[in-house]
Amino acid sequence: MKKKAACISIVCTLLASACHTGQSEKILSGSHKAQLSLEQASQLAALPLACMQTPYPNKLGQTLGSKEDLGEPQVLHPAFYGCFDWHSAVHGHWSLVRLLKIFPELQEAEIIRQKLRENLSTENILSEVAYFERSQENSYERTYGWAWLLKLAEELHTWNDPLGRELESNLQPLTELIVERFIDFLPKLLYPIRVGEHTNTAFGMCFAWDYAHSLGAETLKILIEQRAREFYADDMACPLVWEPSGFDFLSPCLEEIDLMRRIFSEEEFHEWMSLFAPQLLQNNYVLEVARVSDRSDGKLVHLDGLNFSRAWVLYGLAKQYPVYRHLLPLADAHVEYSLPNLVGDSYEGGHWLGTFALYALQLSE
């Protein structure tokens, strides 16, 4: 990391500003409104339940080596064929596991357990592995779908339930393949991908790091930390005012913050933030919610996802470093704008946005 003497004074000045005139009490209390209720959990569960075994419409993202590669979605991907595309099916399964962990009394619990057991069978997962091992599919779902698969594996690993152990074991061959794909790919990626959609490098590395940290996968964890420093440690003045782009569901600037808060020491992180995004320490910082003009448009509705992903970054940042707790109302505002639109939303958003809402809400508490 570039060492600049000015960064220390910037940090001190902004920290002092945050604590001026009794503001420290406001920051430390940091009360905010976004919390997940049992009723909301039931509504969120309904979204993946409605699509996880629904084959059409379907966006395969397939590379054909020959006509023999063609097949029905549930044949090509017997575990993850619903919810329009593979990665949405994966994180739909994650959301159901997460909801069962938070609310074991959920009224949909039995049907959720049944569908999880049906989809994540040993046979189905081995078929998924076989698809990934096709010679022309080496980059399939790189790295967004990979990241969500590892998030699902992590959630199963930390679920204290016999079904969790069964499904974790069933998923293991695909989990190991995805870990290998990350380990093979990251050293070859010379430049990070700084976009607001699926291929965002920082997002994929965040979830892969979480998996590696939770399960003690040291080779993957060390590699991610090394590459994150090489990609991002010298970054400065991220242009948040340029965001969002029209189809974003991730913030390039905030996703980078989300990654670096995981791997930097506290001292390193504050020094880095003083150069990368010093405005976030200002008590009067404003980040307007992303507005959606047409929720029936599958790309424009991405901006609801951006509101949720921005919120989860801000919640995670404030939870780890209380000096950022003044950002909690901004996170809440982003959730409150998009959350009411999930119920009754068109399929374009409903097949995936529930997961984003859940991930944001779980970090808000």
Image: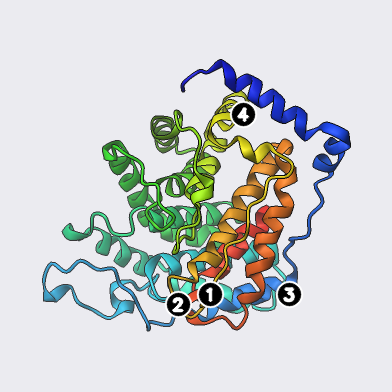
Q: Nearer the viewer, mark 2 or mark 3?
A: 2
Q: Which mark lies nearer to you, 3 or 4?
A: 4
Earlier in the chain: of badge 3 and badge 4, it is: 3
User: Residue drawn 64% across and 48% down?
Assistant: 314
Q: Amino acid at mark 3?
A: Glu
In the rendered image, is residue 365 in sight?
no
Q: Label 2 vs label 1: CA separation? A: 9 Å
In space, the residues marked 2 and 4 are separated at their CA atoms by: 39 Å
* Residue at (56, 56) in percent of width and height: 309
| Mark 4 neighbour class, 10 Å CA radius: few under 14, some 14 to 19, many 20 or more | some
Nearest-to-viewer mark from 1 and 4: 1
- The residues tagged by marks 2 and 3 sit, at their Cα atoms, a distance apart of 28 Å
- In space, the residues marked 1 and 4 are separated at their CA atoms by 37 Å
Q: Which residue is mark 2?
A: 297
- Of callouts 1 and 4, the N-terminal one: 4
- Amino acid at the residue labelled 1: Ser
CB within 8 Å, label 2 to label 1: yes
Q: Nearer the viewer, residue 274 or 339?
A: 274
The type of residue carrying mark 4 is His
Give the residue number, with chain letter if any, for mark 4.
270
Image quarter of residue 257: top right
**Residue that carries the numbered disc 1 in the rendered image:** 293
Residue at the image point whose x is 43% and y is 30% from the top: 229
Q: Which residue is mark 3?
A: 39
